[in-house]
Amino acid sequence: MKYLVTRLRANTDTVLLLFDLAGVFVFAVEGALAAMKAQLDIFGLLVLSFATALGGGMLRDLLIGATPPNAIKDWRYGATAFAGGGAVFCFSNLFQTVPVDLMLVLDAAGLALCAVAGVTKALDFNIHGMLAVLMGALTGVGGGTLRDLMLARVPNVLKADIYAVAAIVGATVIVLGLKAQWPRTWVMLLGGVTCFALRMVAVWRHWNLPKVMVH
């Protein structure tokens, strides 16, 4: 029985790592594309890739006491971020032709992956469910916010159609699912799909949160 529990834990840890690294790669590509549009050199491109991919996760780790952050402790995170940025630099002509719709899909996927990894890790550190949800959202939107600030523009998360809210909803699904003792891997997948679907429907239907209208 102890062996089965150990194997199950190892499998879920592997799934969590895959979610985390996949999200890192997607956001690294996004950061590199933003750097390319801002006409930054290769150093600036790699810095922005790293910040976009790992900024949210590093801040989450510092807040929950997981120090040093995985981005510093585990070489695979930095390597994945630089791989995403390097791919954009080496194949810039190919990435310039990527349709906007495809980038929206990749962005939603990255948001979902990082939100799942963030809330799950926070729960592993015995963070209260409500705050774990916020850590999941922070993981999903933190890097993009840092990217926008570095490029001196209003962070997209503050104005995009149901962006951070999608991460919060997906993270909440995970917290509730685990509280109901559903299988951990399936709960993670369900939370990720919920976040992704909500974000894509929001883009498709042009959903926005209420705003104060200035006359």
Image: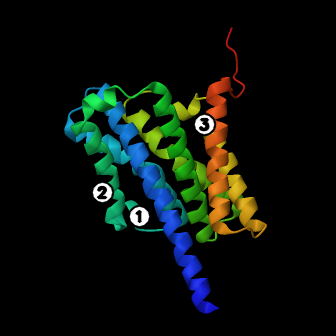
Q: Earlier in the sequence, mark 2 or mark 1?
A: 1
Q: Quadrant location of the N terminus?
A: bottom right
Q: Position of residue 187 (x, y in %)?
A: 68, 61
Q: Is residue 179 above or below residue 89?
A: below
Q: Earlier in the sequence, mark 3 or mark 2?
A: 2
Nearest to viewer (mark 2 / mark 1): 2
Picture quadrant of residue 94: top left
Residue 178, which numbered label? none
Amino acid type of the residue tagged 1 in the rendering: Asn
What residue sits right under mark 2 in the picture?
A: 79
Residue drawn at x 61%, y 91% as measured from the top left: 2
As helix, strand or loop, the secondary structure at mark 2 comes to helix
Residue 163, which numbered label? 3
Report whether 100 appears left or right of 209: left
C-alpha separation, residue under disc 3 versus residue under disc 2: 27 Å
Q: Position of residue 28 (x, y in %)?
A: 37, 44
Amino acid type of the residue tagged 2 in the rendering: Ala
What residue sits right under mark 1 in the picture?
A: 70
Residue 17, can we see it? yes
Residue drawn at x 42%, y 45% as measured from the top left: 26
Residue 58, can we see it? no
C-alpha separation, residue under disc 1 versus residue under disc 3: 25 Å
As helix, strand or loop, the secondary structure at mark 3 comes to loop
For label 2, count other residues whose C-alpha is less than 10 Å away and answer few (under 14), some (14-19) or many (20+).
Answer: some
Q: Position of residue 9 (x, y in %)?
A: 57, 77
Q: Quadrant location of the C terminus?
A: top right
As helix, strand or loop, the secondary structure at mark 1 comes to helix
Is mark 2 in CB contact (under 8 Å) with mark 1? no
C-alpha separation, residue under disc 2 versus residue under disc 1: 12 Å
Residue drawn at x 72%, y 25% as measured from the top left: 210
| Pick the front one: 42 or 138 | 42
